[in-house]
Image: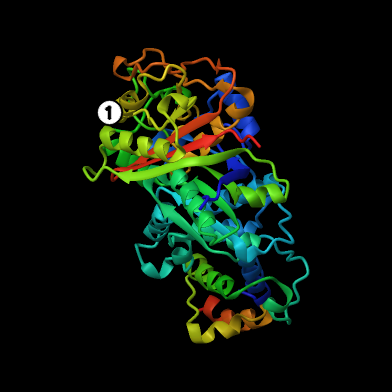
Amino acid sequence: MTKDEIKQIVLDIIEEIAPDEDLSDVKPEVRLRDQLDLDSMDFLDIVMELRKQHGIEVPEEDYGELASLDSCANYLEPKFNQ
Amino acid sequence: METERIVITGIGLTSPIGDSMADMRKNLLAGKSNLEMIDMRYMGMVPAGVCHYDPLKYQKKKEVRIGTRAGSIAIFCAHEAIQNSGLDFESYNKDRIGIYVGTTEHGNVETENEIYNISKFDYDTKFWTHHHNPRTVANNPAGEITINMGITGPHYTIGAACAAGNAGLIQACQMLKLKEVDFAVAGGVSESIHTFGIFAGFKSQGALASHEDPNKASRPFDKDRNGIVVSEGGALYTLERLSDAQSRGAQILGEIVGYAMNSDAMDYVLPNPIQQSACIRMALERAGLNPGEIDIVNTHATSTPQGDIQECEAIRNIFSESKSTYINNTKSYIGHAMGAAGALELAGNLPAFEDGTVHPTINIENLDEMCAIPNLVINEAKDIGSVDYILNNSFGMLGINSALVLKKFHN
């Protein structure tokens, strides 16, 4: 799975958990919390949906890796391609 | 010392027969119910009362997703009530607003949904949502109002089975009299049609209505009644001390002149007409009224074979000599809205202060002679000229009884 595909997966999850947000211009290098109305509970939802939909575990100490779309893709790529 | 008088200055509601008091009243006078068959998890089709308000009128999509149905109903009703009250909400001191929401139960819906969710993952609890606790804490529906509207005064729910709608209003009266708050939003809400457990529990108890036509299923006092139609809904009122309401020139929809609550201390589910009568008498005494001065008694009767007879006995005990007291029932149109029932049914009758009419009880084809109480208004509305006092009964499991006396406001 490519990094772009992984970014799209994360965006699809964000669309579910933050349905009021406009996701048409999310900058991959910028922290998600700096450009979208997301709180810590929303990030727990992202972690839960990765677990439910893709069987991927993100341990608590790695939550910081989900800060931006780019960091998500870098962190999740090996997990998706295992 | 003169006791502070408490008045109703606004109302917001959602019910199966309308999302405003005017719409609800129109349908009640026209004899139009609106119950539906819904597909209940594990059970199949069951009759139920469903609300069709627009949650996105006052909530973001994310709030609807994270919150509960009871919270959403409460938020809708609170916004509508405060708008209806004409309060300058933006500049009002939000620390002085109290939120008192009656609920029959809370948390069943959310817990059942989560168990269903993890059943798809071999019951592994790591798939259990972190939203579970804030969704299921007992204060959830009241707390969601405060978050949505930025209200910083006290909030809590009043768990009082199916007497909860009245109990919410009584709590508001008490807090206003104690000057704990200056403005109260109070009543009751129900999300109970979203839990199979309520339906299955009533079914196991032999108290769940069944009928091929859902609009015929809720039939209090009819010989062939066979149980409750569970509904969702909500009705929240704004209440104020009379002096405050008058000083801001508020509309006054009615005055709460008497209320009472007591307990049967007898049985988990069976009602007790002696204690129901005692509760009604206490409310009348506090209002300083004789039974004959009450124009309308809105019954709690839920269409169960036993419960309706018991309440009729309680009413006979008190009103048998009251020639001008008329009796009706609102559940025949909207089903049993559980925690919202008392508050919603009051909303169905408050307009009688203006139109002088008693809305009928519908669906009575063969009146049960055990329920043949004098002046029961059946199937057609009755114009009685003027209505000055309404008694609103609500009773619930574990033997909890409540009665409210409302007076038409005369300046």
**B147 shown above or below B205:** below
- Residue B384 placement: quadrant: top right
The colour mode here is rainbow
Q: Is any part of residue A17 visible from this angle?
A: no
**B410 shown above or below B64:** above
**A2 shown above or below B214:** below
Where residue B147 appears, x then y in whole percent? 60, 63
Determine the chain carrying the residue at label 1: B
* Residue linked to disc 1: B306
Q: Nearer the viewer, residue B372 or B204?
A: B372
Q: Amino acid at mark 1?
A: Gln
Q: Nearer the viewer, residue B32 or B395?
A: B395
- Label 1: which secondary element: helix
**B154 shown above or below B109:** below
Count up the numbered dots: 1
Residue that protrudes farthest toward the top in the picture: B366
Residue that protrudes farthest toward the right in the picture: A25
Quadrant showing the C terminus of chain B: top right
Q: Residue at x 41, y 27 (%)?
A: B291
Where residue A76 appears, x then y in whole percent? 57, 79
Q: Is any part of residue B282 visible from this angle?
A: yes
Q: Residue at x 36, y 35 (%)?
A: B281
Where residue B241 appears, x then y in whole percent? 59, 51
Residue that protrudes farthest toward the bottom in the picture: A61
Residue that protrudes farthest toward the front in the picture: B1
Q: Nearer the viewer, residue A27 or B357?
A: B357
Q: How packed is label 1: few (under 14 Cα within 10 Å), some, or many (20 or more)?
A: some
- Residue B254 placement: quadrant: top right
Where residue B351 appears, x then y in whole percent? 60, 30
| Residue B228 located left or right of residue B72 | left
Q: Nearer the viewer, residue B333 or B174?
A: B174
